[in-house]
Image (spheres, rainbow, N blue to C red):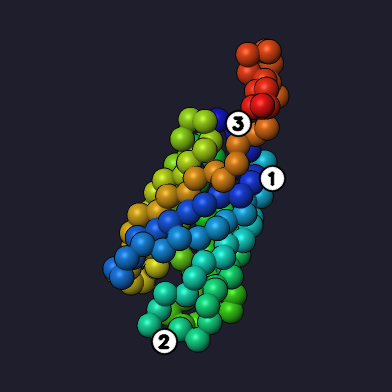
């Protein structure tokens, strides 16, 4: 797989209290992954509305691994490990997250928010305005 994962991804993960959605921006530099995540704070009594985190990891073929580090850590959030696989057209990453040294883990799914731009190639594909 040679598809670059750079882009914006809509994601969700399951945890004991339910599903959490997030927005990730990935930068794929020859298989080295970096980026950022924003997500709501869902911990009871959390004094902040949105968490920010950095991502670092790598991609090798369809295998993707990265670590999410909350900045700042706290409120029950610190470092989370992700292991997953990219589908054949590089539009989804599916796998598991875990917090090392604990029993906390679950599934995650990331879907590319936008695909590559495609130009209309035939007259039939060009939409005419409705009058």
As measured in the structure, the alpha-carbon distance from the residue carrying label 3 to the one carrying label 2 is 44 Å
Extreme residue in the front direction:
131
Of label 1 and label 2, which has the lower sequence position? 1
Q: Secondary structure at mark 3?
A: loop
Say which of 60 and 88 sits in front.
88
Of label 1 and label 3, which has the lower sequence position? 3
User: Which numbered tag is attached to residue 45?
Assistant: 2
Instruction: Tell me what residue is drawn at x 42 percent, y 50 percent.
Output: 109
Q: Position of residue 46 (x, y in %)?
A: 45, 84
Q: Position of residue 119 (x, y in %)?
A: 70, 24
Q: Secondary structure at mark 2?
A: loop
Q: Decide: few, some or many residues near mark 3? Use Cα within 10 Å; few <14, some 14-19, many ≥20.
A: few
Measured along the vertical axis of the image, is residue 101 above or below residue 35? below
Q: Position of residue 35 (x, y in %)?
A: 63, 57
Q: Decide: few, some or many residues near mark 2? Use Cα within 10 Å; few <14, some 14-19, many ≥20.
A: few
Of label 3 and label 2, which has the lower sequence position? 3
Q: Which residue is mark 3?
A: 2
Left or right, 117 with reference to 10: right
Q: Secondary structure at mark 1?
A: strand
Q: Nearer the viewer, mark 3 or mark 2?
A: 2
**In the picture, residue 20 is in which quadrant?**
bottom left
Q: Which residue is mark 1?
A: 29
Determine if residue 104 is in view: yes
Measured along the vertical axis of the image, is residue 124 above or below residue 109? above
Instruction: Tell me what residue is drawn at x 48 percent, y 49 percent.
Output: 110
* C-beta proximity under 8 Å, tags 3 and 2: no
Q: Decide: few, some or many residues near mark 1? Use Cα within 10 Å; few <14, some 14-19, many ≥20.
A: few
Q: Nearer the viewer, mark 1 or mark 2?
A: 2
Measured along the vertical axis of the image, is residue 20 above or below residue 57? below
Left or right, 83 with reference to 9: left
Determine if residue 58 is in view: no
Measured along the vertical axis of the image, is residue 77 above or below residue 31? below
């Amino acid at each position: 797989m040679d598809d670059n994962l750079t882009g914006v991804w809509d994601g969700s993960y399951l945890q004991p209290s339910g599903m959490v959605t997030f927005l990730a921006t990935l930068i794929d530099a020859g298989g080295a992954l970096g980026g950022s995540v924003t997500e709501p704070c869902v911990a009871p009594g959390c004094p902040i509305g949105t968490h920010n985190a950095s991502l670092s990891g790598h991609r090798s073929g369809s295998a993707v691994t990265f670590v999410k580090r909350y900045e700042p850590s706290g409120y029950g959030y610190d470092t989370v490990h992700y292991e997953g696989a990219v589908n054949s057209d590089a539009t989804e990453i599916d796998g598991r997250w875990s917090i090392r040294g604990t029993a906390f883990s679950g599934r995650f799914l990331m879907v590319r928010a936008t695909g590559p731009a495609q130009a209309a190639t035939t007259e039939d594909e060009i939409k005419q305005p409705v009058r």
